[in-house]
Amino acid sequence: MVQLLTPTGERRDDPEYSPRVAHLDAEALRGLYRDMVLVRRFDGEATSLQRQGELGLWAQCLGQEAAQVGSGRALAPHDYAFPSYREHGVAHTRGVDLADLLRLFRGIDHGGWDPRAHGFHPYTLVVGAHTLHATGYAMGVQRDGLVGTGDPARDTAVIAYFGDGATSQGDVNESFVYAAVNNAPLVLFCQNNQWAISVPPSRQSRVPLVRRGDGFGIPSVRVDGNDVLASYAVTAMALERARSGGGPTFIEAFTYRIGAHTTSDDPTRYRSAAEDEYWRQRDPIERLRLLLVAEGELPETFVAALEVEATALAERIRAFVHGLPRPATSEMFEHVYATPHAIVDSERAWFAQYEASFLDTAAADGRSHA
Amino acid sequence: MTGIERMTFARAINCGLRRTLETDPKVLLMGEDIGTLGGVFRVTDGLQKDFGADRVVDTPLAESGIVGTAIGLALRGYRPVLEIQFDGFIFPAFNQITTQLAKMSYRTRGRLNLPVVIRVPYGGGIGAVEHHSESPEVLFAHTAGLRVVSPASPADAFVMIQQAVASPDPVLFFEPKGRYWDKADVDLSITVTAADGVVSTSGPVVAMDRARIARQGKDLTIAAYGATVSTALKVAEAAAAEGVSVEVVDLRSISPLDAETLVTSVRKTGRCVVVHEAPVFYGTGGEIAALVSEACFFQLEAPVLRVGGFHTPYPVNKLEREYLPSLDRVLDAVTRAMAY
């Protein structure tokens, strides 16, 4: 398992991967630290908002910040990422306003951001389905001639995020097949967070997940997913291989979902407090903090400013969610098709006149949501 | 390729696909055995040779992967046209089609559209083994976000495959495989193109989502699509010999349904029989019966009757003549409707 930073914040030298992070100076490391702190604060605020009834559901990324921020920061702006539904840290690195993630969980939008503007696809809730989309997108990049040109401004890679449970899905296995035989510029990034809701990886695979790549002919690497430097390094190398025409790479980022699967889940029914404690000792943010402190690169002023920024983010998120309006009922009928469809059109028209027939109610409704 | 040429249904689709490959560099064909072999029905014969293996792609044998990767290619600006080898093999891709392909526009509020065409040879009557003769079209028509069409003639097949490729929406294109060898005149001068979301045609064509009156009549309307249109036309001939004037509506599109053409016809004739190979129970016929009874209640002289497959799995091929809506069974329905 590739590790460049131990849980106690000491650097470890790796001849293959250390050079990949050599250019990350103290400012860059503080940037990664800031990313993770902000994402964690956001994640906690979203959890609170769900508990207070403001969100229908929330899927926490608590504990997985290093895998997400490390891999996400290795991407180029013109790369494209296909997340599952817990990649809030990646969203942050792609410039998506974290507040926009809450539209989905607030129940006012199935997406919430412009995928093309951010190179960050909408969340996909059908487990593993998007890995094929990522593969096809990468095949499109190949056809566009944007692989192996040697021009870093043009060469493009695609990354697909999925979990340990998803590795059992047919679609994920098919994406391995299609990516391999097409030599697609794709990084298959699995966050093995040890739990697919209540089921451990031993119920998904008889071999370590990282070995799944072998049978498909896909180079594979296991990385300490709680180590932001190692996550960055292995992803950077895989992206470079993809962009240069070297084909797909499978990464198993070994991490842990500290929180519940979602706010509807109760992890105490299937795992122990001891396990929880074991992983809290391997916290992804703490180990980077320890490194920065040891290297004398975490000034009090920075910490204080970050705390102010995180608090402001949380307050902004809270106000944003409270201000999110209920969509107009008529929006239900929009964008089912790109071009007019007679059935949708007739149902839209019928429903409009039906609603208009309750004029008093409609007026009252308008007031309550004004 | 211009002017009128007599050709088979399969050849007409081949010509239509060729036309789209020529006019739009973003069009890709993908499927199992469609390249070197030219498809198990030879519908894509010669296309890989002329357009290369990057545009006419032999995929791995995995249908979900075909549709899933096509979604990704469409997101990247391509227009994939997929072949599912047989109707009964579409189900491994059912999840990708219904949860992903159908919903991308809706989920992204129109930011992402998926112009993907899925060609499906469907229907029976060719003496095939199981899973090779089914008619699953309503499973897709029941899913919002998909367009579902089925041409009935070579001429329509040539135009409609081009219309399907030009559509910015996903289209399930059901090809009545029992008609692949039927020959008729095809007007090859018609080209359908899409540029910046605007579909244009080089000649007069019926829109992809509109029905067509295949034969005029005044006593009874038969609504059919795909393979059963030619059955309906034969029924109309036989009924005419008995003094019954049958109008045949070729629906062409299952989603949406062209209610206007259908209702206009039934208001005129007062009777309606719906014919399809798919099982009658929860089928297109039931939808049409509800539509017609609501819109034509005061004009109806008889209940809407349905003729189609039974609520059984598709039977062994030695029994398929009895399972399929034959000329005799449709004629029986016509007689029953006329008896009211």
Image (cartoon, coloured by chain):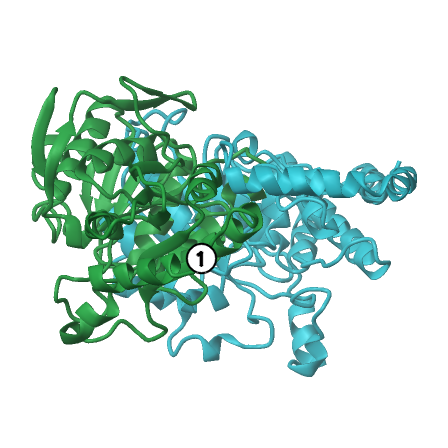
> On the picture, is A93 further left or further right than A182?
right
Camera-side residue of B83 and A62? B83
- Which residue is at 25% across, 50% downward? B232
Residue at figure coordinates x 7%, y 32% from the top left: B6
Observer-nearest of B12 and B242: B242
x and y, in percent, of residue A70 in the image: 55, 47
Of B287 and A337, nearer the camera is: B287
Name the element at disc 1: loop
Q: Chain of mark 1?
A: B
Q: Residues within 10 Å of mark 1 (few under 14, many from 20)?
A: many
Q: Which chain is green?
A: B
Question: Position of A191 compared to A356: left or right?
Answer: left
- The residue positioned 60% from the left and 71% from the top of the image is A197
Which amino acid lies under the numbered mark 1 shown in the image of this protein? Val
Q: Residue at x 77, y 50 (%)?
A: A41
Q: Is residue A244 visible?
A: no
Position of the N terminus of chain A by quadrant? bottom left
Q: Quadrant of the C terminus of chain A?
A: top right
Residue corresponding to mark 1: B304
- Compared to residue B190, the image places residue B247 above or below, namely below
Rendered colour, chain A: cyan
